[in-house]
Image: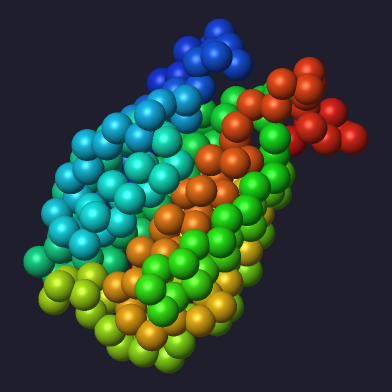
């Protein structure tokens, strides 16, 4: 469905390395999404998407990334939660990319391995500016499970793939083992959050952009 309106880049042109914030909005005939982000926050979150389990996952993402995150979304959830989840991934990814700025002084690479009862999930991220997504290991029941009667876990792959593309990062996401779709999904969100937190952190020894090219 084509966009009806699109507004972004509210970040000031003079954004400094100490001011890693962004606001991105997107409106279509299917959804209206607004995201405010502060990469150097404490994990405060105000999440309202109309999809309760998705709200829970985004709250967890904020808690574990220590990103301050406001997401207000409304969409055609009476049809399906798919459009709301997908479009939130688009806007959140764009906000992360925008807030990172020129990436001067960051660690750049990050990884996290998260256990949740019987589940073990690993996320590895490079804030490279070159989108690439690899995911493997989710069990077959992820394709058919629905949590809370409203969140179909088949969307997990699409959410993270969309986030990766719009954040312009490289993400490898591996479910080493797991049985419960709730545990698998939550461990995925936590692992990605922790990996981004590590990669976006400031490196006190890095005085420039962490790339031999001089740009990311």
In-front residue for pair 207/2: 207
Residue closest to the far bottom:
140
In-front residue for pair 9/192: 192
Residue closest to the far front:
117
Q: Residue 156: where, in percent of width, then height?
A: 40, 69
Q: Looking at the rendering, which quadrant does residue 86 occupy?
A: bottom left
Residue beneath the point at 49% across and 37% down = 96
- Say left or right for 119 vs 44: right
- Say left or right for 58 vs 21: left
Q: Where's the N terminus, which quadrant?
A: bottom left
Q: Residue 119: where, in percent of width, then height?
A: 44, 75
Residue closest to the far right:
212
In-front residue for pair 19/56: 56
Residue beneath the point at 56% across and 78% down = 176
Asked if one can make out residue 104 in the rendered structure from this viewpoint, the answer is yes
Q: What's the colour scheme?
A: rainbow
């Amino acid at each position: 469905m084509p966009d009806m309106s699109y507004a972004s880049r509210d970040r000031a042109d003079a954004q400094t390395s100490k001011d890693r914030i962004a606001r991105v909005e997107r409106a279509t005939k299917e959804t209206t999404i607004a995201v405010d982000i502060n990469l150097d926050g404490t994990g405060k979150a105000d999440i309202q998407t109309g999809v309760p389990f998705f709200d829970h996952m985004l709250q967890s993402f904020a808690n574990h990334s220590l990103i301050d995150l406001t997401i207000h979304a409304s969409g055609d959830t009476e049809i399906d939660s798919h459009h709301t989840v997908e479009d939130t991934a688009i806007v959140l990814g764009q906000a992360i990319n925008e807030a990172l700025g020129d990436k001067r002084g960051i660690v750049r690479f990050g990884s996290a391995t998260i256990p949740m009862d019987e589940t073990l999930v690993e996320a590895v991220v490079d804030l490279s500016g070159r989108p690439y997504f690899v995911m493997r290991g989710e069990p077959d029941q992820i394709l058919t499970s629905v949590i809370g009667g409203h969140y179909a876990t088949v969307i997990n792959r699409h959410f993270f793939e969309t986030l990766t593309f719009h954040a312009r990062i490289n993400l490898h996401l591996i479910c080493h083992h797991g049985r419960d779709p709730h545990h698998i999904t939550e461990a995925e969100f936590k692992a990605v959050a922790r990996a981004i937190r590590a990669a976006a952190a400031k490196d006190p020894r890095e005085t420039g952009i962490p790339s031999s090219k001089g740009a990311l």
